[in-house]
Amino acid sequence: MAGLCAAARARELGADPVVFEKGDRPGGSMLLSSCVVWRYRSLEDFRAECPGGDPLLQELIVERLDEALAWLESLGAPVVWGETGNPRTIGKRFDPKGLTDVLVGAAGEIRLGEPLSETGEALLLATGGFQGDSELVKRHITGEPVLLRANPWSAGDGLRIGLARGAALSAGLDEFYGRAMPAPPARVPEEKFVELAQLYGSYALVLNEDGEEFAPDPISWAETDLVQAIARQPGGRAWYVVDDPTLDVRIRGRSVSEMIEAARDSGGAVLTAPELGFDLPDSYRYAVHVAAGITHTVGGLRVDDRARVLGADGAPIDGLFAAGVDVGGIAVGGYASGLAAALVLGLTAAEALSSL
Ligand SMILES: Cc1cc2nc3c(=O)[nH]c(=O)nc-3n(C[C@H](O)[C@H](O)[C@H](O)COP(=O)(O)OP(=O)(O)OC[C@H]3O[C@@H](n4cnc5c(N)ncnc54)[C@H](O)[C@@H]3O)c2cc1C
């Protein structure tokens, strides 16, 4: 998202960028996403939801997102919903394949299968975070096994290149955005990342493998705090135990019973509550085995509000920019749209690069 948006904008401004894409297809995690590009209604709301995040970057997103969405539409990006359906947020949902195609068409030269390398020219790091590198995840986030719920190529290359050039790290290095997914042996292919997400943790009794409750109280609306807590439990697993009335609750267009059915169809463990073997009240009906799935990291490189990567002394590093998940410190302590950050910082980086 960030790299393609930046390239498209840079071309509009008269530059001649080259996009290096390590994967065998363009679109990264954007192509796999629900593609809702959104912001909080105000900077105050953003600050309250993500209190550890960088206020300057949060302000940039709140101020620039609406014009950035209009820019995407002006390129022909297909809108599926004109609003998010969430009273806390403002934004649009795009068709991910259509959005990818439009951006690929506007981005110019894309070298598929070619990892980014230092060329001696100005460089924008937009490799999508470090969730795909299990060593980095173990070092910064959790020693427990977690599922990757993202493209496989975002494995910390931007972070490594930035650090080798003296970049400073942001806050939030131990945080991530993710979802509870059916635990192995469930099969969770990338085209089912959205459909298989188990989104009803706040309605469930959440137990670890020893039958202990550990969920944050209260669980946040996006449940990202719960998923991060699961990632730190033994095995990175939990049980969501639900009663009958919960089965009919609808969350983002799906009922809890549909989500449980999807978990069962994927080969995941769905037990009756007595089969779980813990001493539970009779009212509980099903227990679904879930695992923490990482969609993207929250910490990364520190940048300023022109997307310039900052060094340890706080000064911009010559010719080095970052956008998207490679930029850390935006959603620290909460949850915010990764696509919105990628879009706004991608445009900002292109404009800063073009004025060099
Ligand atoms: C299932 C799912 C649902 C989601 N739903 C939403 C949603 O509704 N709303 C939302 O805001 N966000 C959502 N997201 C998150 C969103 O997709 C990401 O935040 C966004 O794509 C981040 O943009 P990015 O440009 O940083 O990374 P990406 O879009 O992942 O792009 C990074 C690119 O860098 C490439 N790359 C990696 N390493 C290298 C290298 N060394 N050299 C060259 N290329 C490299 C990767 O192959 C990839 O193409 C979802 C994600 C998933 C997986």
Image (cartoon, rainbow, N blue to C red):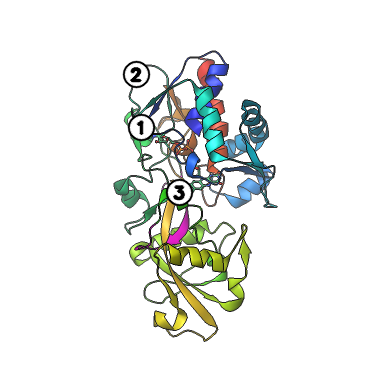
Amino acid at pointer 2? Thr
Residue 165 seen: yes
Amino acid at pointer 3? Glu
Query: For this rendering, which residue is in front, 252 or 129?
Result: 252
Residue 175 seen: no
Residue labelled with disc 3: 191
Residue 49, percent across and down? 60, 51
In the image, what residue occupies the spot 64% across and 35% down? 65
In the image, what residue occupies the spot 35% across and 41% down? 155
Residue labelled with disc 1: 22
Measure how far apart labels 2 and 1 are at the Cα level. 16 Å
Location of residue 170 by image quarter: top left
Measure how far apart labels 1 and 3 are at the Cα level. 20 Å
Location of residue 144 by image quarter: bottom left
Q: Residue furthest left?
A: 135
Q: Which residues are magenta?
A: 171-187
- Say few, some or many: other residues with alpha carbon within 10 Å of mark 1 (under 14 / 14 to 19 / 20 or more): some
Measure how far apart labels 3 and 2 are at the Cα level. 34 Å
Whether the residue under disc 1 has CB within 8 Å of ligand 1: yes
Label whose residue precedes the other's in the sequence (1 or 3): 1
Residue labelled with disc 2: 119
For label 1, the SS is: loop
The answer to whether 346 appears left or right of 91 in the picture is: left
